[in-house]
């Protein structure tokens, strides 16, 4: 039964992303959204942890010392995740700006996740607040953070009507022109983190 429930939930979420993406002007791109969730590795590891109200990635991380094979497999195959644009080189974390259409797909995904997993409390403001509360823990460039924040805030205030393609593209170019395309941060592995 868990297998069927998991399949229905990820498919429902994917269809919601496609609806959101169409309103953001990236319909055809979104048709490939999250197809890796149906792969053997992701599907098997995910349905085993299915609860219907929480992320299977979060559940795996709780079980496996904060490591998730699902997350690594998924984010390395889906360009709408900020993790896809993170690299490591000579003791540094290298961050690249997310391209415009993948930023929009990220937003479509975030809105869909909130609507799919917590429909009763869904609102643009809830999604924006969720992002703001966590964004400092995301390895995103300043430009990517600012643009995604702007998209989610605009949605909270105006819905999709405030996110016409011409406006969003212009805003992306305006924000990315203020910052470097690539940011580097030195890694310090001398200290271990313990909760």
Image (tube, rainbow, N blue to C red):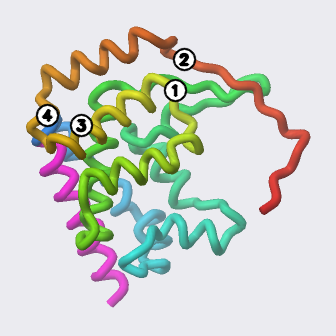
Q: Position of residue 117 (x, y in %)?
A: 32, 69
Q: Are marks 1 and 3 in contact (CB under 8 Å)?
A: no
Alpha carbon of mark 1 to alpha carbon of mark 4: how far?
Answer: 24 Å
Specify the segment rendered in magenta: 1-22
21 lies above or below 142? below
Magenta: main secondary structure equals helix
Between circles 1 and 3, the one closer to the viewer is 3
- 11 is within the stretch colored magenta: yes
Q: Are marks 2 and 3 in contact (CB under 8 Å)?
A: no
Which residue is depicted at the point 43% across and 72% down? Answer: 54
Q: In the figure, is residue 139 to the left or right of 8?
A: right
Between circles 1 and 2, the one closer to the viewer is 1
**Which residue position holds label 4?**
162
Q: Are marks 1 and 2 in contact (CB under 8 Å)?
A: yes
172 lies above or below 112? above
Q: In the figure, is residue 61 to the left or right of 173?
A: right
**Which residue position holds label 1?**
141
- 8 is within the stretch colored magenta: yes
Q: Position of residue 122 (x, y in %)?
A: 25, 63
156 lies above or below 12? above
**Which residue position holds label 3?**
154
State which quarter of the image contains the C terminus.
bottom right
Say whether residue 185 is visible.
yes
Q: Are marks 4 and 3 in contact (CB under 8 Å)?
A: yes
Disc 3 on helix, strand or loop? helix
Alpha carbon of mark 1 to alpha carbon of mark 2: how far?
Answer: 7 Å
Alpha carbon of mark 1 to alpha carbon of mark 3: how far?
Answer: 20 Å
Which residue is depicted at the point 24% across and 70% down? Answer: 119
154 lies above or below 95? below
């Amino acid at each position: 039964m868990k297998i069927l429930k998991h399949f229905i939930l990820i498919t429902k979420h994917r269809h919601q992303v496609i609806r959101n993406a169409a309103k953001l002007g990236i319909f055809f791109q979104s048709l490939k959204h999250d197809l890796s969730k149906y792969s053997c590795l992701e599907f098997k590891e995910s349905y085993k942890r299915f609860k219907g109200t929480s992320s299977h990635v979060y559940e795996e991380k709780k079980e496996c010392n904060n490591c998730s094979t699902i997350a690594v497999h998924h984010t390395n195959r889906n360009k709408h995740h900020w993790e896809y644009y993170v690299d490591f080189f000579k003791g540094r974390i290298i961050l690249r700006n997310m391209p415009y259409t993948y930023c929009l797909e990220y937003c479509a995904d975030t809105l869909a996740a909130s609507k799919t997993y917590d429909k009763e409390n869904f609102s643009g403001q809830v999604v924006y607040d969720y992002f703001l509360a966590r964004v400092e823990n995301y390895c995103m460039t300043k430009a990517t953070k600012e643009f995604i924040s702007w998209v989610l805030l605009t949605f909270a205030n105006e819905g999709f009507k405030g996110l016409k393609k011409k406006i969003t593209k212009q805003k992306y170019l305006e924000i990315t022109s203020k910052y470097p395309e690539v940011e580097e941060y030195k890694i310090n592995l001398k200290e271990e983190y313990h909760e």
